[in-house]
Image (cartoon, helix red, strand yellow):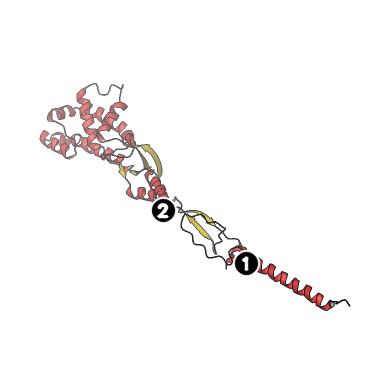
Amino acid sequence: MKATIPKEKIYRSFIYIGVTAVIIFLANFIVTREGLFSAKAIYEQGQIADKTIVAPYDFYLYEEEGALKQKQDKALADIVPHYKFSSGASFQAMKKLNQIFEILENSPEKQAPDAEILSKFNAADFNISRKQLNFFKNKNVRTKIYKTLMHNLEKIMQKGISTKPIQSDKIILLKEGKKVETLSKQIMTPQESGAYLLELTKGKDIFGDKRLQDITLKLLYAVVEDNVEFDAVSTSRAKELAKSSIPEIVGEVFLASQQRDACL
């Protein structure tokens, strides 16, 4: 007589096998899932991760400190110093020139002793000898000198005058509300303004007499004044803007909403 296995036991065995298979599959899936039971990875700065890393928040990528300072220093070094140009200096130079001429033009002064006249000239930085004074007393001489200086004084002052040496090859000239980049060698010292006057009057036969030229140049040196001055505030502001223009943040990482939700 053959032994038969009841159908109920067969069905029950299949159910056990199926359930066991499902449990094994789920257990294998959970255990082998990346990072679930793995030890927490620890990385050092500069090390490359061996797997995908998901941060729990958005974050910025910052420039390395040494590289950032190097870029900032380069930006600061490229800043051209700023200088203020005083338009009112031309008026002051012409005013002083008129005051010197008035010493002789005023009738009471014409009768004054030479020593007194020379003293007043010296007080105005116009230093001439007694012999030059006698030559300067000539009305035609004074008229020629006055016209020459008044005609060219504005041109000379517009070039820029500075007794202090300018170290930079280029400067930004703040002139009449505008910023003009110019070569520092174009800014003249008072002595260089004399050479420029001779250049402006070249070929016009104004200084045929050497005595005329000497007195004219002494008068010029007496009346010109600095109209170009270093602007520390504007230069500092330009440097601050240049430094701040170098970004500390070189990138930004945004998490997708599902990544953020998963991390949270």
Q: Could you say which is closer to the camera, residue 152 or residue 170? A: 170
Q: Residue 7, image x and y in percent?
A: 84, 77
Q: Where on the picture, by quarter, is residue 187?
A: top left
SS under mark 2:
helix
Q: Where on the picture, by quarter, is residue 220?
A: top left
Q: Could you say which is closer to the camera, residue 169 or residue 186? A: 169
Residue at mark 2 to residue at mark 1: CA–CA distance: 43 Å
Q: Residue 87, image x and y in percent?
A: 34, 42
Q: Where on the picture, by quarter, is residue 209?
A: top left
Task: Tell me if residue 113 can be seen.
Answer: no
Residue occupying the far right of the picture: 1
Q: Quadrant of the N terminus?
A: bottom right
Whether residue 229 sits left or right of residue 255 in the image: it is: left
SS under mark 1:
helix
Q: Could you say which is closer to the camera, residue 127 or residue 232? A: 232
- Residue drawn at point x = 69 percent, y = 71 percent: 23
Is the Cβ of the residue at disc 2 closer than 8 Å to that at disc 1? no
Q: Residue 39, image x and y in percent?
A: 53, 65
Identify residue type, mark 1. Answer: Val
Whether residue 14 sits left or right of residue 147 in the image: it is: right
Q: Residue 8, image x and y in percent?
A: 83, 78
The residue tagged 2 is 65
Disc marking residue 8: none
Disc marking residue 31: 1
Whether residue 220 sits left or right of residue 168 in the image: it is: left
Task: Tell me if residue 100 can be seen.
Answer: yes
Identify residue type, mark 2. Answer: Glu
Q: Quadrant of the C terminus?
A: bottom right
Q: Could you say which is closer to the camera, residue 128 or residue 35? A: 35
